[in-house]
Image: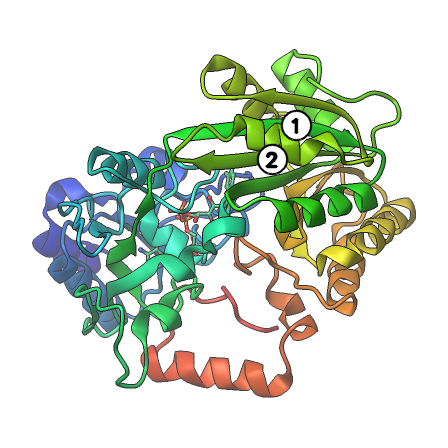
Amino acid sequence: VTALADLLVAIVGPDHVLDDADVTASYARDWTGRFVGEALLVVRPGSTAEVAGVLRACTDAGVPVVPQGGNTGLVGGSVPRRQPMVVLSTSRLTARGDVDAGAAQVTLGAGVTMADWRRHAQAGGFDAPVDFASRDSATVGGAVATNAGGSRVVRFGTMRAQVAGLTAVLADGSSIGSLAGLPKETVGVHWPSLLAGSEGTLGVITAVRLKLVPWYRHTATAMVATGSLADAVAVLAALRSNVANLDAVELILPEAMAVVAAHLGATPPVGDERTGAYVVVELADHEDPTDALMAALADLPQIHDAAVTTEGPARERLVAFRDRITESISAQGVPLKLDVAVPVGALDELMAAVRAALAAHGGRVVPFGHLAEGNVHVNILDPGDPDLLARDILGAASALGGTISAEHGGGLAKSKYLHLVRTPAELAAAAALRHALDPTGTLNPGVLTAT
Ligand SMILES: Cc1cc2nc3c(=O)[nH]c(=O)nc-3n(C[C@H](O)[C@H](O)[C@H](O)COP(=O)(O)OP(=O)(O)OC[C@H]3O[C@@H](n4cnc5c(N)ncnc54)[C@H](O)[C@@H]3O)c2cc1C
């Protein structure tokens, strides 16, 4: 340990190699509290060159490394879980380039937060196309590494679609990638495509060249209550065909509304005992889209209650019912989190399978998610048998043509279920690729490893 620590101190300086257990503990516990490990050392490199030095030293010493951004990942991929293991924190990689208006792009260090990406883009007259509730801590590097989604995927796609370039360091300390941001380039392997969603297993992303989108100054938000999940899907279909500026279509099922309303100490703005699903809809545009939103919702027979707001405190109060669900669940205990997606037409069948699994294996479900992507965060409090719940629910998602992880990644939590959505040939090809880039297994062992 001392020899490695001395080497790392020589690379990043004494202030950025942490070994005091009281200090390193927060880097070793994930956001949910479900995954808690112990860090041999926490290292905070301040440049790509320092990241390279750290990785080379750890690989030479045979000590595995877990890259960590904001540590808001929910599947155990951002914390150490075997001994000894070094945490490589990107918290000092916070350089921000000027907004390049002609290209509608910006270059950011991997440790810049999602909220700062957005603020920086807006200061330059643009906006960031990806947003989600952990924005103040989650980093752009972590978001690329997990191919994060969030509420605006319906309009702009996931994080993968926003990466115009990146730089990353491999386990042996060599650097790959480019920040030129060329929209067209056809010379073989596209590093952003390879690294997006790789969860720190192929390389440490040090900087990203991200796309920007127009900053729509006006947002209109509605929360509507429908009789069933199938009715919510019908509302989605109508919105997709009738509105051009759809920015978010989020789903809250009644159990989740009850938990968040109690946490906020507030009454749900819409709905009653008839309500089977709540949908939060946002339109964003250069002109106020409130009238368009009201018109789009007006004649939909599936809606039995609706509230519409524009910017300001009223909108914040409404959006809090969606944004603060994860936090309200954690306030009640450590949940089992199964983030799945199915084709939207199969959502009803998915929830039937979820409820059957709960009846068989115990637990309280708090479901919500991103309706447009058929993505439900199946959060289970007081899970009776977590393994059987995961087996049945992830199995049902895959049998319905869906995925065991729509966002958040596989991490540790999903490793033993990868075979549900990947063939043996695909798993073997992924393992071979990983071995080629990291032959000694330095980067994030256990994560995305089929077991
Ligand atoms: C309240 C809440 C709401 C959330 N909502 C959403 C949501 O709507 N959509 C969504 O997709 N996610 C959501 N998440 C999950 C999480 O915030 C995202 O996955 C986020 O992108 C993780 O970023 P991070 O910087 O915290 O990464 P971390 O948690 O630090 O790491 C996540 C993974 O990426 C790897 N990694 C991190 N940085 C790098 C890097 N620079 N290079 C290589 N690998 C790296 C880690 O090793 C780990 O495997 C939510 C989380 C919370 C707590």
Residue at the spot 50% in from the left edge and 86% down from the top edge = 429
Say which mark, if any, is on residue 128.
none
Residue 95 locus on image (x, y percent): 15, 45
Give the quadrant of residue 400.
bottom right
Quadrant the C terminus occupies: bottom right
Residue 306 in which image quadrant: top right
Residue 123 left/right relative to 127: left
Label 2: how many Cα within 10 Å (few below 14, some 14–19, many 20+): many
Q: Considering the numbered disc 2 on the image, is that residue within a helix, a strand or a loop?
A: strand
Say if mark 2 contacts mark 1, CB within 8 Å: yes
Earlier in the chain: of badge 2 and badge 1, it is 1
Instruction: Residue at 45%, 16% (x, y): give it.
Output: 312
Q: What residue does disc 1 label?
A: 223
The quadrant of the image that shows the N terminus is: bottom left
Query: Image height check: is 99 above or below 437?
Result: above
User: Element type at marker 1?
Assistant: strand
Above or below 378: residue 317: above
Q: Is residue 447 above or below residue 86?
A: below
375 or 436, which lies in front? Answer: 375
Q: Position of residue 45 (x, y in %)?
A: 18, 51
Q: Which mark is residue 281?
A: 2
Decide if residue 439 is in sight here: no
Give amino acid for label 1. Answer: Met
